[in-house]
Image (spheres, rainbow, N blue to C red):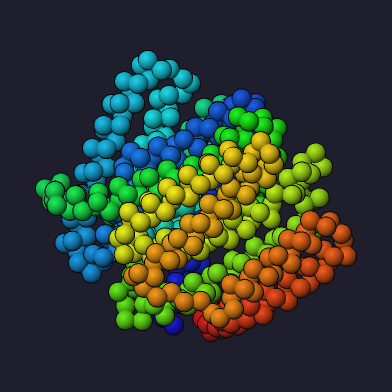
Amino acid sequence: MNKKKELAKNTIIIFAGKVCTQLISFLLLPLYTSYLVTEEYGFVDLITTYVTLIVPIITLELEMSVFRYLVDSRKDKEETKKVYSNNFIILLVSLLIFSVLYLIVTCFWKFDYRFLILIDIIICTFSGNFLQIARGVGRTLDYAISCIITGASTILLNILLIVVFKLGAFGMITSIAAANGLGALYLFIRLKMWKYIDFKRKDKKLIKEMYQYSIPLVPNGISWWIVNVSDRTIITAILGAAANGIYAVSNKFPTILSSLLGIFNLSWSESAALHINSPDRDAFFSDVCNTITKLFSCLGVGMIACMPFVFPFLVNSSYDEAYYYIPILILGAVFNVVICLYSAVYIAKKMTKQVAMTSIIGAVINVVVNIGLIHFIGLFAAAISTAISYFVMMVYRHLDLKKYMNITYEKGLVVKTVLIFIFAIIIYYQRNLYLDILSFVVVVIYSVIMNKDFLVASKRTVFSKLKSLKAK
């Protein structure tokens, strides 16, 4: 029970911090579209996408290795200092090598804001690294505060640089870099990182071990990037930009589910690392997997049941075609929930090679199925290829993990989940108001019954917190 309370507490704290940054793209969209011309916004969006790919490659996913090793060294101050010190050695050397190569390449290949983009990459690298350090040493609240600082700074700086000073794309890139810099600076000062850094503590053995852990995560990260971005690339190349716009609208809805999962996964990966060797490990992991699978499955099917009512109000009629791809993409997002639950177990056991291998398999399946079907069924190919790739990854990881631990699910959970999704999806495509109302009612009742224990526990927690606040 203490483990579950700890997991819930960390999830709530991280949610408070991450939700503001997750909402930034929605809050600032009217500002961007009003003050930036299409070319500027498209350029910055492309740069942001590629920065998310480049940063983990520069450091070879060092930040994930630092997080995992700091979790193990929490009770050993000397070991913590050693991890800190070697992390900074690797980080500084990696950034120096990248910067030199970047400046050489940009001497021949010149593009707008290339020096500002280099600064942005360097700052984002430090920001990502410091955030994982905060998680590794158990400073979850400071992690959340840093995210809030970054999110609030992004909004304020965008308004100042884009609206007031009208700096366009330059102002947008500058605000992103500066906001990440402020969040990183807060963590550096708050965690007093300078006290733990001693370059004399260089340990070649530890550096080798950290790289052995993190390097397999690089192809994993690239594979996830391929799964998420290849669809758009293939659609644009074969069906055109207009089709990609429709698909982008479809993807907005399952992204909500993925964002919520990402927030939970930050605290889950920490709990998994802390309790991977506990005597009651199998029971704890099974309990969490059951709870989260039921919760997110019901959120997914609930979104499908709600979509006929909210879609016409959220999406312009010219994008009506996007309606038909949403259930398949949501189904894929639900498969991804289980994948991420298992991924945290692999990382906790330091089995990152298996994470990379399964992700590569998923990426290959996604590309092959998409290209093979897109000429015949159009945008359905992109949605189906995503769902299939996630399904294969989910099944493979479930079977593979049985070699190392016993994660069991409640009897009948899989059958119930499959049946409720079939029911909701069949009615979804009928586009009949009365059937939609029936579907919504059935899904709500089903969701309450399936998550009864979770809802009761949440209610007790909220009421106990309120009572304690009143007592104070």
> Residue 199: x, y in percent?
15, 46
* Image quarter in which the N terminus is found: bottom left
The answer, for residue 184, to whether it is visible in the render is: no
Total labels: the figure holds: 0
432 or 203: nearer the viewer: 432
Instruction: Identify which residue is drawn at 21% across, 53% down.
Output: 209
Instruction: Identify which residue is drawn at 48% across, 74% down.
Output: 288
Q: Quadrant of residue 414?
A: bottom right
> Residue 471: x, y in percent?
53, 84
209 or 467: nearer the viewer: 209
Instruction: Identify which residue is drawn at 70% across, 65% down.
Output: 422
> Residue 356: x, y in percent?
38, 51
Instruction: Identify which residue is drawn at 84% across, 56% down.
Output: 431
Residue found farthest to the top: 108
Is 452 left, or right, of 430 in this rendering?
left
The answer, for residue 304, to whether it is visible in the render is: yes
Above/below status of 126 relative to 265: above
Above/below status of 327 relative to 379: below
174 or 415: nearer the viewer: 415
Is 255 left, or right, of 85 in this rendering?
right
Above/below status of 347 relative to 367: below
> Residue 100: x, y in percent?
28, 26
Residue found farthest to the left: 200
Is 69 left, or right, of 12 in this rendering?
left
